Amino acid sequence: MNQKILDNREKTMEKSNFIRQFEDFGIKMYVLAILSIISIFTGSFIQLIMFIIMLLSLKNIKDANLELQNEELEKFRKYIIYAVIVGIVGALIIIVIAVIVAFLFISAIPGFTFSDPITVSEFEDIAPLIRILLLVLLGGFPVGAVALGLLLIAWENFQMFLKRNAGLFPNTVAAKAIEGSGKIKKSYLYLLISLIIGEVLVLIAIFIFPQIETLIIHFIEETTPSMGLLGGVVAALAIPGIVIVILGIVSFILMIIGYFKLSELKHL
């Protein structure tokens, strides 16, 4: 009889630990929602803080899963870590290549300063390096796509966990958490779509670079380009660019709403 009471107490303690960890996770989601709004008016410093908080929230997920040993919950944590690793490694590689290209850029025009107007000859000297930068940018898209794909898988697993284990939470909290995880997943999907469109945009820029080069020379010489040239370049670049901006805004809004919905977990 005493042993049975002890076993029930241990189960209660384990459950309270699970609830406590998810409450802490919900609090961090609330902080991320607030910081996301603040980030509109600030710079990358807030983004760094958000990144750290997100990583700390994974510790809550790990501790909460000690009792359940749920595969979907563990995949959520691991796939986010994988996405972070891919993103960091990819960013470092791109930064190194960009620094090398920037060094070549400076070497191509000794004494060049951004305060002085660029001449046609100077632009023609650096035009090949701009092509290289576009290719470097193009190479960065697959890395970003892999990272976003991993984040999509992560949040898909988290939503599946919430749906299949909704009974662990109060009904209203579970419903909002499921909805929130779905919105964050959709946010990353829109980012992935915008990234793919961005890659198409860079490919277009590479393909029509001679026309872009001619247009820039017209601007440097302060001459009027033909309407066909101007309209063609603007149409080719502006339309995908506008779509990317719209998708980015929608993704950002969905992310904030998703964080707020998930923050309901703090009320367990």
Image: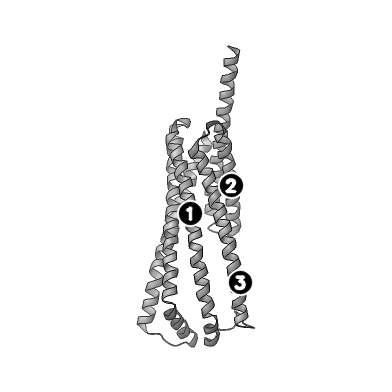
The nearer-to-camera label among 3 and 1 is: 3
Which amino acid, mark 3?
A: Ile
Q: Pointer 3 and pointer 1: residues touching (CB < 8 Å)?
A: no
The furthest residue to the left: 228
Residue visible at 61% across and 71% down in the picture:
100
**Residue in the foreground of this view, choosing between 126 and 231:** 126
Q: How far across and how far down the image is residue 59, in percent? A: 59, 41
Q: Is residue 180 above or below residue 39?
A: above
Q: How far across and how far down the image is residue 42, in percent? A: 57, 59
Residue 8: name its quadrant: top right
Residue neighbourhood size for the residue with mark 1, other residues' Cα within 10 Å, grouped as few (<14), some (14–19), many (≥20): many
Residue receiving disc 1: 148
Residue 176 visible? The answer is no
Residue visible at 45% across and 85% down in the picture:
218
Q: Pick whichever of labels 2 and 1 is earlier in the sequence.
A: 2
Residue visible at 57% across and 28% down in the picture:
14
Residue receiving disc 2: 55
Residue neighbourhood size for the residue with mark 2, other residues' Cα within 10 Å, grouped as few (<14), some (14–19), many (≥20): some
Q: Alpha-carbon distance for marks 3 and 1?
A: 27 Å
Residue neighbourhood size for the residue with mark 3, other residues' Cα within 10 Å, grouped as few (<14), some (14–19), many (≥20): few
Q: Secondary structure at mark 3?
A: helix
Q: How far across and how far down the image is residue 113, in percent? A: 62, 81
Q: Secondary structure at mark 1?
A: helix
Q: Pointer 2 and pointer 1: residues touching (CB < 8 Å)?
A: no
Which amino acid, mark 2?
A: Leu
Q: Alpha-carbon distance for marks 3 and 2?
A: 32 Å
Residue 265 visible? The answer is yes
Residue receiving disc 3: 100
Q: Alpha-carbon distance for marks 2 and 1?
A: 16 Å
